[in-house]
Image: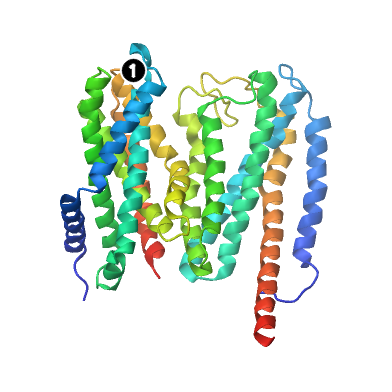
């Protein structure tokens, strides 16, 4: 007798959200990191008005990628250290549900970071970043990061070098996603129609999510 | 699995000799038989190794996916050995691809390297498979190492596929396409004449298939030997 997939997924998401609401550890770390990163970039690149226009997407996404690596590492490592993963492994639930639950949780946390960054960067860089196509790009892009990131973090959390291995494993693999995200976001900022790129982004997300769903059960077995 | 210490099997011997002889013939075809390109001169001859070695790398990385999928399904170590051989051989061929491209680009594009979309994605592909090797070395439990490597090997193929298709989806690349029309901004494209086909065809088969398959075969053999040695060591320790 196994618990139905969706009920399990929702209870894992609820558990993660509740833990996060009580500790505020993950999101606050990620947001603080993201703000620092945005500031460091603007000092390091000495941005003037024209330069800003060209690099703002790059800054946003590099920041989001590193913030998500930070969050993913914590999310899966905590699960291992506190025995959450073992508990989920021995419960009569489909393995796929663990993946979906953790993935949606990570997606929501990183999305919060992105949604905090958009208005702040709108003010700091004096550009309108709050546009429907950009928010769609953000949602789909973060979804892709979370779907492949949860799979890889579940692996690297079990290795010797842990925190250091996730960026090495994750950065090259997400380049296809990043490429499409940046293309979509730049098209939006130029004022053109970007829905073609956003459709491609959806396709990349689908590939990553399929890989995650298919392969996750192998990486958490013991 | 073979456990005796013996000479290589006949199939491997034939493959090895065929590969060596044909590689030499392909070299002669590319260097001396094919006529010199009107615009680019002799440096264009590098192309006969550049594009085939990428396909060789791609074939090897596909072998990694096949090995990974089958390992996850059957849990037989030999599939993981195939996957590992694919990554190592593919990496070498991918480096040959980058190197020949870089030497060609120096006179044609006037630079060793440029952050063009395809060049970047080819470099990323190399880094992904380097990360595969790092991931392997980071896990002590051999069972777990094989499972994780299989998963990562399957995921990594996305970067190889991206490198293959990127000049069709990114509009402003300067890398020429071999099959079909080159991108608008491509620099250094040349006509796909009979003359080019004569040297490219054989080299494509040699570098794209013969060399990766032969090298992987040797690598798998080496790994099997190493496993046998490991086993004997454990046996010797148990007896002593």
x, y percent for residue B114:
57, 24
Question: A95 or A192: nearer the eye?
Answer: A95
Residue B20 visible in the current orientation: yes
| In-front residue for pair B73/A50 | A50
Q: Quadrant of residue A167?
A: top left
> In the image, is residue A3 above or below residue B84?
below
Depicted A144 relative to depicted B9: above or below: above
Q: Residue placed at 75% from the left, 62% from the top? A: B12
Q: Is residue B207 left or right of residue B152?
A: right
What residue appears at the point 21 percent right and 55 percent down from the top-left corner? Answer: A16
Most distant residue in the top direction: A49
Viewer-nearest residue: A12 or B34: A12
Residue placed furthest toward the bottom? B239
Circle 1 residues within 10 Å: few <14, some 14–19, many ≥20: some
> Which residue is denoted by mark 1 in the rendering?
A53
| Quadrant of the drawing holding the N terminus of chain B | bottom right
The quadrant holding residue A108 is: top left
What color scheme is it?
rainbow
User: The residue marked by circle 1 belongs to what chain?
Assistant: A
Which quadrant of the figure has residue B79? bottom right
Horizontal side of B85 relative to A107 (left or right) equals right
Specify the quadrant that holds the C terminus of chain B.
bottom right
Q: Residue at x 73, y 41 (%)?
A: B202
Residue A56, percent from left and from top: 33, 23
B213 relative to A151 in the view: left or right = right
| Residue B61 point in image, percent of width and height | 57, 50
Image coords of residue A112 (percent x, y)? 22, 40
């Amino acid at each position: 007798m196994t618990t139905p997939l969706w009920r399990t997924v929702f209870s894992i998401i609820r558990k993660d959200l509740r833990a996060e609401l009580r500790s505020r550890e993950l999101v606050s770390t990620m947001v603080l990191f993201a703000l620092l990163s945005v500031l460091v970039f603007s000092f390091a690149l000495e941005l003037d008005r024209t330069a800003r226009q060209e690099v703002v997407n790059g800054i946003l996404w590099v920041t989001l990628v590193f913030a998500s690596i930070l969050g993913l590492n914590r999310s899966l490592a905590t699960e291992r250290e506190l025995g959450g993963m073992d508990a989920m492994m021995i419960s009569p639930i489909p393995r796929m549900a663990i993946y979906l639950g953790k993935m949606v949780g990570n997606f929501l946390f990183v999305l919060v970071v992105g949604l905090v960054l958009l208005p702040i960067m709108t003010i700091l860089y004096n550009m309108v970043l709050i546009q429907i196509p950009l928010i769609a790009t953000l949602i789909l892009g973060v979804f892709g990061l979370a779907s492949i990131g949860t799979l890889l973090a579940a692996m690297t959390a079990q290795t010797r070098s842990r925190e250091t291995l996730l960026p090495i494993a994750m950065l090259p693999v997400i380049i296809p996603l990043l490429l499409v995200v940046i293309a979509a976001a730049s098209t939006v900022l130029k004022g053109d129609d970007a829905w073609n790129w956003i459709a491609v982004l959806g396709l990349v997300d689908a590939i990553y999510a399929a890989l995650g769903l298919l392969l996750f059960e192998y990486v958490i077995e013991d | 699995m073979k456990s005796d210490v013996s000479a290589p099997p006949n199939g491997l011997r034939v493959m090895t000799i065929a590969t060596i002889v044909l590689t030499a013939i392909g070299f002669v075809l590319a260097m001396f038989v094919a006529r010199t390109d009107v615009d680019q001169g002799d440096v264009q001859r590098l192309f006969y190794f550049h594009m085939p070695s990428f396909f060789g790398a791609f074939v090897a990385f596909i072998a990694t996916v096949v090995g990974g999928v089958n390992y996850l399904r059957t849990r037989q170590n030999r599939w993981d050995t195939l996957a590992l051989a694919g990554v190592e051989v593919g990496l070498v061929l991918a480096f040959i691809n980058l190197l020949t491209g870089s030497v060609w680009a120096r006179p044609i594009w006037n630079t060793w390297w440029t952050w063009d979309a395809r060049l970047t994605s080819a470099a990323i592909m190399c880094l992904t498979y380097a990360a595969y090797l790092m991931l392997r070395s980071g896990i002590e439990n051999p069972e777990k190492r094989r499972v994780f490597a299989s998963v990562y090997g399957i995921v990594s193929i996305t970067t190889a596929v991206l490198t293959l298709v990127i000049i069709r989806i990114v509009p402003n690349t300067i890398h020429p396409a071999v099959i079909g029309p080159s991108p608008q901004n491509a620099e250094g494209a040349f006509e796909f004449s009979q003359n080019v086909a004569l040297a490219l065809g054989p080299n494509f088969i040699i570098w794209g298939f013969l060399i990766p398959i032969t090298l992987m075969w040797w690598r798998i053999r080496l790994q099997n030997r190493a496993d046998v040695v490991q086993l004997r060591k454990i046996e010797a320790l148990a007896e002593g």
